[in-house]
Image (cartoon, rainbow, N blue to C red):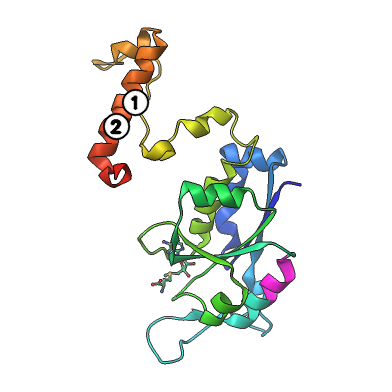
């Protein structure tokens, strides 16, 4: 059974292109995973389809209401599924988290908007909270897209060449090495000689050295 993902959002059309294009689009078309995007307003019961309200205690903005979100999650969830809220105060997304989630059977992703969501949703129907980085987006739909893309790469068959998973930034706590393709000479810039040598041992040595150099420069924290 392929991984089933249900995404609950107020902006379902934001992902139309994303889910149809490139490696992810092909993975979905080939049946390696299935993604359904739901409009949360479908579960709002009043005539204006209200999904948000003013925060108790005052303050700026609006808060997503508990009733439609509870109703939506209770309808799409299945026994044993993992219900995830995308939020800047969640656990930082990492390859380890993406890999773990790629092995689940069913994920329900919740995207927030405005000032966030009623805390009772988090307390009542959410199993895990994930952030895609230390910055704040206007809503969680793109964050959900990032999570879907990152985990899909770990599903067997989604990447043409599974070995690209072992040659990526963050594997072995290193950033990636520089890549080149034809032509060997472009506007006076040449491809490093060693990559044209055909000497695989030397190429590996050069690549490892570049990885270490780059990681030291940009992400020394990974080497600690
Ligand atoms: C404007 S944000 C709410 C921010 C919230 N008041 C706070 O300061 O933590 C609206 C929604 O965008 C999503 N979001 C924003 N930044 C995110 C991030 N870095 N990672 C994951 N989701 C994010 C969440 O779903 C959130 O409910």
Q: Which residue is at 58% across, 41% downward?
A: 154
Where does the image place residue 127, in percent across and percent down from the top left? 59, 68
30 w.r.t. 185: above or below: below
Q: Which residue is at 23% across, 38% downward?
A: 217
111 w.r.t. 171: above or below: below
State the separation of the CA atoms marked 2 and 1: 6 Å
Q: Magenta segment, principal secondary structure?
A: helix
Q: Which image quadrant: the C terminus?
A: top left
In this rendering, position of residue 170 left or right of residue 97: left
Instruction: Determine whether label 2 and label 1 are within 8 Å by CB.
Output: yes
Residue closest to the far front:
224
Where ligand 1 lies, by image quadrant? bottom left
Where does the image place residue 214, in percent across and percent down from the top left? 28, 34
The residue closer to the viewer here, 92 or 133, is 92
**Which of the labelled discs sits on residue 212, or is there none?**
2
What residue sits right under mark 1 in the picture? 208
165 w.r.t. 84: above or below: above
Residue 111 belongs to the span the image colors magenta: no
In this rendering, position of residue 6 left or right of residue 187: right
Q: For residue 118, say whether it is visible.
A: no
Classed neighbour count for the residue bearing mark 1: other residues with Cα under 10 Å, few (<14), some (14–19), many (≥20): some
In this rendering, position of residue 164 left or right of residue 155: left
């Amino acid at each position: 059974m392929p991984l089933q993902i249900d995404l609950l959002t107020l902006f379902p059309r934001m992902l139309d292109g994303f889910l149809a294009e490139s490696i992810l689009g092909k993975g979905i078309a080939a049946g390696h995973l299935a993604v359904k995007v739901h409009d949360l307003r479908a579960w709002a019961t009043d005539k204006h389809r209200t999904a948000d309200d003013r925060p108790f205690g005052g303050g700026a903005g609006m808060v997503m209401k508990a009733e439609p979100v509870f109703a939506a999650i209770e309808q799409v969830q299945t026994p044993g599924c993992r219900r995830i809220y995308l939020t800047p105060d969640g656990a930082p997304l990492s390859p380890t988290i993406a890999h773990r989630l790629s092995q689940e059977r069913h994920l329900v992703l919740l995207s927030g908007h405005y000032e966030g969501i009623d805390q009772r949703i988090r307390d009542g129907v959410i199993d895990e909270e994930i952030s895609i980085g230390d910055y704040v987006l206007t809503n969680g739909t793109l964050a959900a897209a990032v999570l879907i893309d990152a985990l899909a790469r770990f599903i067997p068959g989604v990447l043409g060449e599974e070995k690209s998973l072992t040659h990526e930034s963050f594997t072995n706590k290193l950033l990636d090495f520089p890549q080149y393709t034809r032509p060997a000479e472009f506007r006076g810039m040449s491809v490093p000689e060693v990559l044209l040598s055909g000497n695989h041992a030397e190429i590996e040595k050069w690549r490892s050295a570049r990885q270490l150099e780059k990681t030291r420069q940009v992400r020394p924290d990974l080497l600690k």
